[in-house]
Image: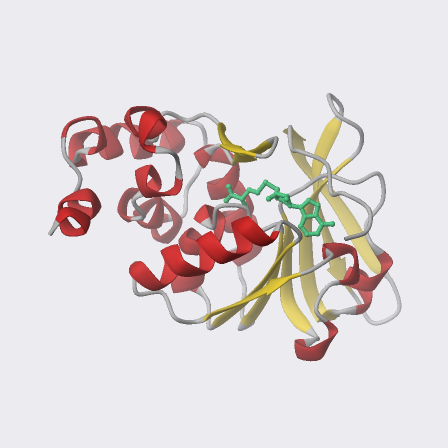
Amino acid sequence: MQQDRNIRGIGMTSARTRDRLVERLRQEGIKSTAVLEQIRSVPRHLFVDEALASRAYEDTALPIGLGQTISQPYVVARMTEALLDNFSGESVLEIGTGCGYQTAVLAPLVKTVHTVERIREFYQKARQRLRELDIYNVQFRPGDGWEGWPKYAPYDGILVAAAAAEVPEKLLEQLAPEGRLIMPLGPAGRQDLIMVVRKNDHYEQMSLGAVSFVPLVKGK
Ligand code: SAH
């Protein structure tokens, strides 16, 4: 019952508060109706500490402990929109599950998501949270995202939620032909969201604009 009430949302987590967030993202250039609907329906307040729940529908990153953050809704929407624009693929690999918010926004829009997180506590919590939200097409793994998840490769899409100076080689290898990888590239303060598309004999890279992410930590 308590859970049910939480999911429906009251007060600062109400439908009106969510509508305002969606309107703002639309004004900032998010066009995909499917993505905006996901932002509206995924209960972001359940992904943060209760003390921060009243700020869950602000367009801002929030701390989730251990020096990590839940991504800003605009960035989640932008990455998901870029990943799914003209996307005919089925399988997506996500690196940096964190609290699982991006995973929950993305999963209902694709066939399968495989997601890797190096902090075991986050991995466990995210897995439990998504079950509670009745999202079942996600496979979770504690591990090092630099290695990807070779067992289920190749992936039609790869989404990395932490920044690095270079694109991890193993992730490029695990990309299907015409598959696309989206990740923040560059040092803190000068990160660029990039998209890499795998072509027959080369990779094409384009920029999607400036962003700010926590680092993709080297090693487990
Ligand atoms: N996707 C999340 C945001 C995650 S923040 C959201 O929806 O809000 C980035 C996450 O990447 C953190 O949880 C961090 O622990 C994780 N991370 C950093 N380096 C990693 C690595 N090498 N392998 C796997 N996960 C990593």
Q: Residue furthest left?
A: 1
Q: Residue furthest bottom?
A: 151
In the rendered view, would you say 171 is above or below 155? Answer: above
Residue found at the far front of this picture: 121
What residue appears at the point 25 percent right and 34 percent down from the top-left corner? 18
Residue drawn at (70%, 78%) of the image: 151
Query: Against 177, is 118 above or below?
Result: above
**Residue 199's spot in the image, x, y percent?**
79, 66
197 or 57, nearer to the observer:
57
Total labels: the figure holds 0
- Residue at x 75%, y 25% (from the top left corner): 188
Name, please, the residue furthest toward the right: 201
Asked whether, in this view, residue 65 is left or right of residue 153, the answer is left
Across and down, in percent, residue 101 comes to 44, 47
Q: 158 or 127, which lies in front?
A: 127
In the depicted view, which residue is nearer to us: 71 or 143?
143
Residue 50: quarter of image: top left
Quadrant containing ligand 1: top right
Q: Is residue 111 above or below residue 23?
A: below
Q: Which residue is at 62% across, 45% downward?
A: 161
Residue 115 position within the rendered picture, expressed as x and y whole percent measured from the top left:
58, 61
Q: Is residue 209 above or below residue 99?
A: above
Corner quadrant of residue 27: top left
Residue 121 pos. (x, y %): 54, 50
